[in-house]
Amino acid sequence: MNRVSSFAFRAAVAAIILFSGVSRMWAQTPGQTPGGTPPPAATAPEPAKQPDADQNPFAAQPAPPLPPGMTGSDANDPRYKLTPGLYDAGETSLGIKHLQLVKKPDSFQLGVTDPDDPKVQRLLEQLGIGGGMKLPKELQLVIAELAFSNSDLAFQGNHLFQGNFYGMNIFDISNPAQTALVTSMVCPGGQGDVSVYRNLMFMSVEMPNGRLDCGTQGFPPEPPPAAGHEKERRKPAAQADRFRGVRIFDITDIKNPKQVAAVQTCRGSHTHTLVVDPNDKDNVYIYVSGTSFVRQPEELAGCSGEAPDKDPNTALFRIEVIKVPVAAPQDAKVVASPRVFIDPRTGALNGLSNGGSHGKGDEETKPSDSNQCHDITVYSALGLAAGACSGNGILLDIKDPVHPKRLDAVNDPNYSYWHSASFSNDGTKVVFTDEWGGGLGARCRPNDPSKWGADAIFHLHDDKLTFASYYKLPAAQGDTENCVAHNGSLIPVPGRDIEVQAWYQGGVSVMDFTDAANPKEIAYFDRGPIDPKMLVLGGEWSAYWYNGNIYGSEIARGLDIFELTPTQFLTQNEIDAAKTVHVAELNVQNQQKLEWPAQLVVAKAYVDQLERSQALPADRISALRTAIQSAESSHMNKGKVSKLSGMAPSLEQSAAAANSPADAKRLRALAEILKHPSA
Amino acid sequence: MSSNELKSRLERFHGACKSELRSARVSALVCAVLLASSAAAGFDSFAVRGQQSNPATGPVVVQPGAPGKPSKTLPPSTKGVLPARSQADVEFMQGMIMHHAQAVEMTALIASHTDNKDLRLLGAKISSSQSDEIKFMQRWLAARGEPGSMAMPGMSDMNASGKPMALMPGMLTPEQMEALRNAKGAEFDHLFLTGMIQHHNGALIMVKDLFDTAGAGQDADIFNFATDADNTQRAEIKIMQAMLEKKTSEEKR
């Protein structure tokens, strides 16, 4: 269809949509002429396919064919065709038990729509609702969509903080299976990325409706222009009450958070990262990643969205560092705007176009002029940060947290958008994610390439990143399920690198990347799509392990709570060993070094792993188990314990001859515990 | 109408809606509208509810004030509220659908016009994202009761011959499209890359215009979509510029 005819055709279709209700028409063959009016004759060759108003706009989009040489996800997986539903969708899992879904509170859902508004009726007509009497909850979701989406999670003690584009919800998780809402805090501005530190809670705001006073009204459009001035461009008035940046709340009273500071930035804050400097007890730092438009200087002095060759002070090509005095958070302010994309040789601010790649020469054809970070994960114990920065993954030295310095940068021919990063606990690997399609699209269909929208696992050695492999949710998902790699955290199983990760409506996937070149899925949970016919935004935004449970922030449905159950891929001992690690606070992007106590349960986890990898013969495995068991049942009788200690040297010898570095580490760690075990 | 009056009227309608006698599609629609809206208002017992609130022990709804100001407690029945919708948002989506459709039209030519592997892969990705985004925009408009196109019969956007009066920024003219259709091989590659760069740059202008309009871009979907489109198109422009440079340097060799 050429431009003119398709244009006229669309106009005709639009008229039909408006005046006769669209559901009848949807039943017709696409392309059939509605209303008996023939479309104008085509005057040029037609393109193969043109998405157009002649299709039901709510109908799901089938995936295009796989590009040559690519493979897709598994359509035979039980997760592919689960029954749809908002609260009654089919579920399936492996090694994960779903304990509870706490629904999104009413105050964070769209309220009444005026029943007299003709647009409401039109909307329902378009949805084809009318025959059945079932409450069309999807209707509210479609209208509201992102405006009330749940986003990231943070944890402190018995409290879970769930960010939302509309504010924050705080839950009591002292009994995870009976998690209860404590506080709903209304304060819109998206996307509500959250961190907690002692009595302070931090929250990202990026959208133009954000207000200093947490008001829900946003800012009004300007009155229509006077007659004769319709075509003149008018700059919007600067709004002194607009807020885009990082809010700081005092949460001393968990039921009454108080805003103590609101630090404005030029691009707002899409995400932020809490940085705790081990050498600075008086302050904490916030790295701000802004990804959206730069506001006008009339609203915030000094803001410029110009290219760096036109304005060396451009707000593009940088991150922001906010310094927060812990005792006086109201004095928080931006103290630096590091140029993390600079080319140190030329001084060009947009220096990251040849940052190195595993693309075998492809870097020449696939540069990316990164001007923003999407998210940064800091690992202060190592003095490092990994930045997922739109076109690049970068590695930063953050020993001086105010002045991070770039150590390395990579790009990837299959990556669309570098989205997030996490380190392995020993700092020898980094897992990056690619949010191909921005999270709003179905990207796990059988025909979506397994290398697109996937994790990319890199080795990290001597401050250099080298590509090892991709990992994508192995199960295909339907075309009404938004799905792509998203946020995850480590599960503290000793002896293995395990990450639990959210894949939006692809659910939760637990991946073992101990062998960086061969990551494997070891557990999962998935529900069917929210809706069978249209893509309603939903699914898990983040899935994080916190003190013994997995919590999933479900965008549309609420908060999911899970626990791991044993399988051949993960034993009860390994799960129990993971539960020995307790933290007082968890902000996943502020990665803490995990350490395990010298307890026998940790030893048992190692023994299970050595059996699985066949690093020790069966007789030695069973001798170890018997010795550990008898030490336990004797309540750590001296004789039994010394028998355990006696087994350590032979394990150390085996370590020296082990087949894999992972087994060598396990053998040594097991020997250490057996030397000085506790119950 | 007071809320009590509204409630009693809604309840009367619910009775009628639940009757077996309901048959006409129109009345079913009215029922559905009223049920949906009353449920959203919290009147109807079969609304799917979230957390129940008990002021003494249950959850609280609070709204902080500006920095340094106290927070206030809101009633447990508080509902979500969105900023007023902006006409600029609607026009942005309508314009961008037209804009994206041309990109899909352009990528559809690749298979029959060039053997360039890089261009084919790039084309597949552009086509996939842009068709997906068109769908997203159509949905956004339809969910808000707006037409998918700006040009409605009787409106001034079309002239007498039915041609659109103006293209969106960066769109290729009919002459440029014709030239692209008639080109093959290396010439097509060049016209495609320069054309798509021009096209994508137009999208960046549209996004900038959107956020430069008072009251616009406050809808979370639009905000996210426009920001994402801006980021991915910038990246694609860079890729295409590099492909052009590589082509030029190869030709010089």
Image (tube, coloured by chain):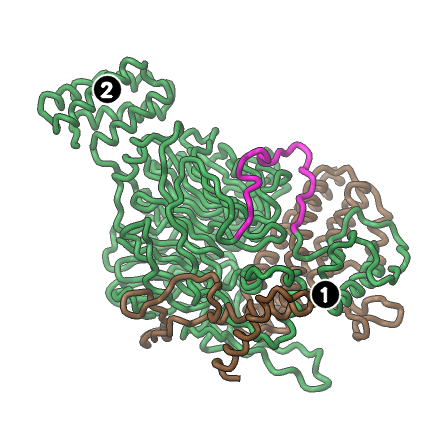
Residue closest to the eye, A187 or B214? A187
- Of A527 and A366, nearer the camera is A527
Q: Which residue is mark 1?
A: A21
Q: For label 1, count other residues whose C-alpha is less than 10 Å away and answer few (under 14), some (14-19) or many (20+).
A: some
Q: Earlier in the sequence, mark 2 or mark 1?
A: 1
Residue at the (23%, 24%) spot, across then down: A671
Horizontal and vertical percent position of residue A64: 69, 43
Residue A45 horizontal/vertical position (percent): 87, 49
- The answer to whether A619 appears left or right of A223 in the picture is left
Highlighted range, magenta: A60-85
Instruction: Tally the marks.
Output: 2
Contact check, label 2 and label 1, Cβ < 8 Å: no
What residue is disc 2 on?
A624
Does residue B131 lie above or below A453 as drawn? below
Which quadrant: the C terminus of chain B? top right
Tell me which corner region of the image, top left, top right, bottom left or bottom right, holds residue A198. bottom left
